[in-house]
Image: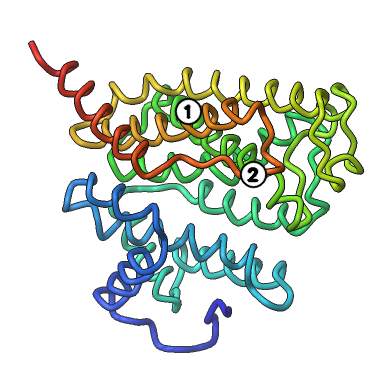
């Protein structure tokens, strides 16, 4: 994967947005529902933001070669989007979107930095270190969407951060085994020490009382963040309330699935069934309708 920073002609804006739309709707399974809940007028700009996020993550997770160098090139293309003449179609579309909605550079740069962090040891000594990572890898996405909605209120952004961090943590606790196979441990090392669970235990796939206690502790942390961030629902317009409610309920369902397995996420990955997802959609929609009723 290359970042296309060669001296090439800048693609037309319409072509750039079409590129972002194709990328967003092609093979990212969680995109469709969220995009349909957005006002139609905002979708092209959401395509641009989403495409930037996915491209950045793909550079950090999948690109062959020197990923740090590729991320540096991509950050240079981001600078061109803000201050110059970008040539990559994602950056061309992004330039238009950030100008229309006055979106600052910080969230985009944080996301690139998160992918630099991913090239490191894959270990987080403390919970504070993990929260800092989430502040770079997850929270910027929620803030980008709020900027597109014109919501610049600090409280909305704080609640969005809580929800996005909770979603990230729920994903980590669901995928402890898979992440370890990729060389990453998102369980804070200080917590592993506290509960007497070592990396050697994790490598052996040991599921014992120490591991269950550790996972229960981390799941409760994530749940508290979901509960804190849920107030964002009442601050959003229209159908976007449903979007946030679904993300939150989906994340809480992942945590519930972990509990049902008695915190054993190593033997079997906890999942939310299709039937459960359908129930969540109906439940969230009905609850929001009742809240709007006189």
Residue 231 image point, x, y percent: 37, 19
Q: Depth-wise, is mark 2 or mark 1 nearer the camera?
A: 2
The residue carrying mark 2 is 268
Task: Please tell me which residue is depicted at 45% across the width and 74% down the height of the picture.
Answer: 86
Does 71 appear above or below 278?
A: below
In this view, the residue farthest toward the bottom is 8
Task: Identify the disc placed on residue 157.
Answer: none
Q: Residue 202: name its quadrant.
A: top right
- Give the left or right position of residue 286, taking residue 189 as reference: left
Task: Please tell me which residue is depicted at 10% across the width and 15% down the height of the picture.
Answer: 293
In this view, the residue farthest toward the top is 294
Task: Please tell me which residue is depicted at 30% across the width and 67% down the height of the picture.
Answer: 21
Categorize mark 1 by other alpha carbons within 10 Å: few (<14), some (14-19), many (20+).
many
Q: Residue 237: name its quadrant.
A: top left
Does 193 appear above or below 69?
A: above
SS for dot 1: helix
Residue 87 image point, x, y percent: 44, 79
- Give the left or right position of residue 68, taking residue 7 as reference: right
SS for dot 2: loop
The residue carrying mark 1 is 252
Q: Earlier in the sequence, mark 2 or mark 1?
A: 1
Label 2 with label 1: CB-CB less than 8 Å? no
Tell which of 163 and 45 is nearer to you.
163
């Amino acid at each position: 994967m290359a970042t296309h920073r060669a001296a090439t002609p800048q693609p037309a804006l319409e072509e750039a947005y079409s590129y972002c739309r194709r990328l967003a709707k092609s093979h990212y399974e969680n995109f469709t529902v969220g995009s349909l809940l957005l006002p139609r007028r905002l979708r092209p700009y959401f395509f641009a933001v989403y495409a930037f996020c996915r491209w950045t993550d793909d550079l950090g997770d999948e690109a062959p070669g020197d990923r740090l160098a590729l991320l540096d090139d991509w950050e240079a293309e981001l600078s061109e989007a803000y201050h110059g003449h970008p040539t990559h179609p994602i950056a061309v579309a992004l330039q238009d979107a950030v100008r229309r909605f006055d979106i600052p550079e910080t969230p985009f740069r944080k996301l690139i930095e998160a992918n630099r962090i991913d090239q490191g040891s894959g270990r987080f000594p403390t919970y504070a270190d993990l929260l800092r990572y989430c502040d770079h890898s997850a929270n910027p996405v929620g803030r980008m969407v709020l900027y597109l909605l014109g919501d610049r209120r600090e409280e909305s952004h704080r609640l969005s951060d809580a929800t996005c961090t909770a979603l990230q943590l729920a994903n980590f606790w669901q995928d402890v085994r898979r992440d370890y196979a990729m060389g990453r441990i998102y369980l804070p090392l200080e917590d592993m020490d506290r509960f007497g669970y070592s990396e050697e235990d994790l490598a052996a796939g040991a599921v014992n009382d120490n591991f269950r206690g550790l996972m229960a502790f981390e799941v409760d942390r994530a749940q508290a963040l979901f509960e804190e961030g849920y107030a964002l629902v009442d601050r959003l317009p229209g159908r976007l309330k449903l979007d946030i409610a679904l993300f939150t309920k989906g994340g809480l369902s992942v945590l519930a699935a972990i509990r049902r397995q008695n915190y054993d996420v190593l033997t079997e990955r906890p999942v939310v069934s299709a039937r459960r997802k359908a129930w969540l959609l109906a439940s969230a929609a009905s609850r929001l309708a009742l809240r709007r009723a006189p």
